[in-house]
């Protein structure tokens, strides 16, 4: 499998985690993997040749688009720099992908040592056959770029779920979770006492300048903007169903097969320097 390659990408600023993340991903899988990150915190150490960093002060979703742009593989996967992946996580996904690329294969997620329930992966858990979104799935970069990449109206989060919805509906795909591939968020309670004290101190230093990724980004931008925007793109009440093509439904809501709001891509001009669309910050 060493001759094969995928690129994992994402917006990232937790530079203190990057060495362990690199070891976790690149030494924990047999397949050759490239990491591409974009963000507004530069690492103060040298990166391996298969670890690319692009500095930018634009919003997180735009950093994701930049990182995606600079990936060099046909197969890509979003990751967070606060995550830990089980051994052979990406090997398992790749093995399934090369056998049948009509599915989107991703992993299971565990937070606070508890696995997500099925409803936690779903776009709308009130609809039993709602699309669901596995963690760090393998995606075809050519397909992503043919759809225009990421919608610039997302500030920080949920853009990935929208991207998956467009892949599902435009290429008639379904998602599958590979149970033996597990991803979990590393929290401070997973670390040693010394590291906990250090991170607590560092977080105070950076808190005035940066909004940390993960839950903080969701609390700041996801709840009030990104999640409602995602839902408005795909979900509506039955009374508004009209002539919309329906992906699935219940008595109250339907999920549309066609995006209800026109997709709005990033412009390549000044992509790395000027925030586009709905603005936000790290």
Image (tube, rainbow, N blue to C red):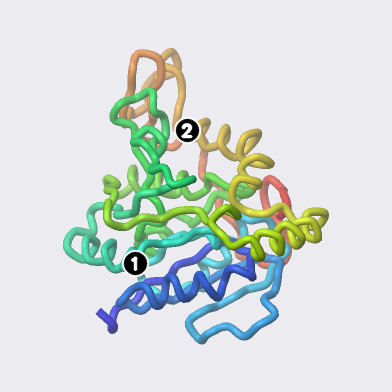
Q: Residue furthest left?
A: 99
N-terminal of the pair, mark 2 or mark 1, is: 1
* Spatial CA span between label 2 and label 1: 39 Å
Q: Quadrant of residue 105?
A: bottom left
Above/below status of 74 relative to 85: below
**Cβ–Cβ below 8 Å for labels 2 and 1?**
no
Above/below status of 28 relative to 162: below
- The kind of secondary structure element at disc 1 is loop
Q: In the rendered image, is residue 269 in sight?
A: no
Image coordinates for residue 28, horizontal then vertical, percent: 37, 73
Looking at the image, residue 15 sits to the left or right of residue 273; the answer is left
Nearer to me, 156 or 236: 156
Q: Residue at x 35, y 13 (%)?
A: 251
Q: Residue at x 72, y 57 (%)?
A: 200
Image coordinates for residue 158, horizontal then vertical, percent: 53, 44
Q: Which residue is mark 2?
A: 260
Q: Which residue is mark 1?
A: 87
Circle 1 Cα neighbour tier, 10 Å, few/some/many (<14 / 14–19 / ≥20)? some
Image coordinates for residue 159, horizontal then vertical, percent: 52, 48
Above/below status of 175 relative to 28: above
Quadrant including the C terminus: bottom right
Quadrant including the N terminus: bottom left
Q: Residue at x 34, y 36 (%)?
A: 118
């Amino acid at each position: 499998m060493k001759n094969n390659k995928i690129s994992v990408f994402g917006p990232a600023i937790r530079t203190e985690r990057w060495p362990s993340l690199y070891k976790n991903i690149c030494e924990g899988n047999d397949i050759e993997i490239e990491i591409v990150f974009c963000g507004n915190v530069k690492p103060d150490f040298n990166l391996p040749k298969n670890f690319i960093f692009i500095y930018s002060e634009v919003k997180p979703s735009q950093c994701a688009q930049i990182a995606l742009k600079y990936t060099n593989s046909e197969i890509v996967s979003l990751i967070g720099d606060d995550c830990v992946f089980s051994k052979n996580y990406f090997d398992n996904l790749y093995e399934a992908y090369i056998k049948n690329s009509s599915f989107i294969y991703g992993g299971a997620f565990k937070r606070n040592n508890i696995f997500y329930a099925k409803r936690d992966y779903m776009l709308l858990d009130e609809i039993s056959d709602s699309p669901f979104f596995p963690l760090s799935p393998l995606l075809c970069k050519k397909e992503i770029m043919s759809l225009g990449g990421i919608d610039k109206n997302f500030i920080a989060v949920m853009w990935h779920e929208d991207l998956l919805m467009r892949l599902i509906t435009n290429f008639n795909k379904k998602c599958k979770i590979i149970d033996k591939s597990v991803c979990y968020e590393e929290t401070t309670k997973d670390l040693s006492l010394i590291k906990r004290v250090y991170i607590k101190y560092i977080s105070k230093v950076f808190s005035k300048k940066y909004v940390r990724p993960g839950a903080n980004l969701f609390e700041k931008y996801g709840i009030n903007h990104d999640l409602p925007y995602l839902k408005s793109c795909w979900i509506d009440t039955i009374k508004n169903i009209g002539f919309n093509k329906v992906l699935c439904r219940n008595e109250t809501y339907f999920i549309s097969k066609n995006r209800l709001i026109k997709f709005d891509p990033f412009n390549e001009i000044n992509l790395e320097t000027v925030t586009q669309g709905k603005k936000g910050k790290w």
